Image (cartoon, helix red, strand yellow):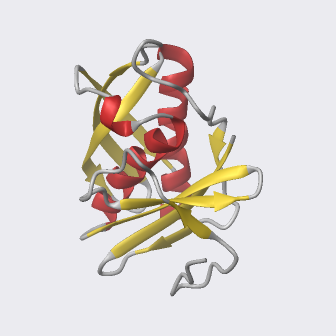
């Protein structure tokens, strides 16, 4: 079991076979839920990497191609809520359009607003084995640290 230096005991990282060596997130094991810890040089980069982590909890990230682009915006009263709103916008894109995010670029971000460009494609049953249906990003054990390096932790309701 991995001991997280910023205080989340009792959680271990799950090895992900499809994980690229430079993938800037870990998938967490949590009873009845899924979670990620993402990091980056900036908070915007950590948020973008959390988008990849969301997709990796659902399917093999390496199987997702960058065929289409979607613009996503989120607003919230603080950066923690902003992370939840951003990821829930991506869950909404998947639920309504089948869109899987391969890579995200945070174009604008302040404490209350985020605008991102997400690259990916619609889920294809022949190539994407959806192993977890994420219902929502939650506030349970949510953590946003500006760093450096910046880190975020989020648990998904599956």
> Who's the residue at 54% across and 27% down the image?
130
Residue pictured at 43% horizontal, 12% vertical: 126
Residue 70: give x, y in percent of width and height. Answer: 31, 26
Residue nearest the observer in this picture, 19 or 36: 19
Q: Is residue 119 positioned above or below 154 on the image?
A: above
**Left or right: 92 in relation to 73:** right
| Image location (x, y in percent) of residue 85 | 53, 45
Q: Nearer the viewer, residue 49 or 59?
A: 59
Q: Position of residue 122 (x, y in %)?
A: 39, 17
Quarter holding the N terminus? bottom right
The reply, left or right, for residue 89 in relation to residue 8 is left
Task: Where is residue 33? Give x, y as percent.
Answer: 70, 50
Query: From the image, which quarter does the C terminus lie in?
Result: top right
Q: Nearer the viewer, residue 15 or 117?
A: 15
Q: Is residue 122 left or right of residue 81?
A: left
Q: Is residue 153 above or below residue 95?
A: below
Q: Quadrant of residue 120 in the image?
A: top left
Q: Residue at x 36, y 33 (%)?
A: 101
Near-viewer residue (60 or 101): 60
State the residue lying farthest toward the front.
Answer: 17
Q: Is residue 72 above or below residue 24?
A: above
- Please give the count of numbered marks on the rendered protein: 0
Displayed quadrant of residue 44: bottom left
């Amino acid at each position: 079991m991995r001991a997280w230096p910023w205080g989340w005991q009792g959680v271990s990282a799950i090895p992900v076979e499809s994980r690229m060596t430079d993938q800037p997130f870990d998938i967490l094991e949590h009873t009845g839920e899924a979670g990620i810890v993402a990091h980056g040089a900036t908070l915007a980069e950590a948020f973008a990497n959390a988008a990849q982590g969301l997709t990796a909890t659902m399917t093999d990230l390496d199987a997702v191609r960058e065929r289409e682009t979607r613009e996503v915006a989120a607003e919230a009263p603080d950066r923690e809520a902003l992370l939840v709103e951003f990821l829930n916008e991506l869950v909404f894109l998947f639920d309504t359009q089948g869109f899987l995010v391969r890579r995200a670029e945070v174009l604008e971000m302040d404490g209350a607003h985020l605008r991102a460009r997400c690259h990916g494609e619609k889920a294809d049953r022949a190539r994407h084995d959806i192993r977890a249906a994420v219902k929502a990003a939650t506030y349970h054990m949510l953590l946003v640290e500006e760093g450096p390096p910046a880190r975020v932790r989020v648990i998904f309701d599956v």
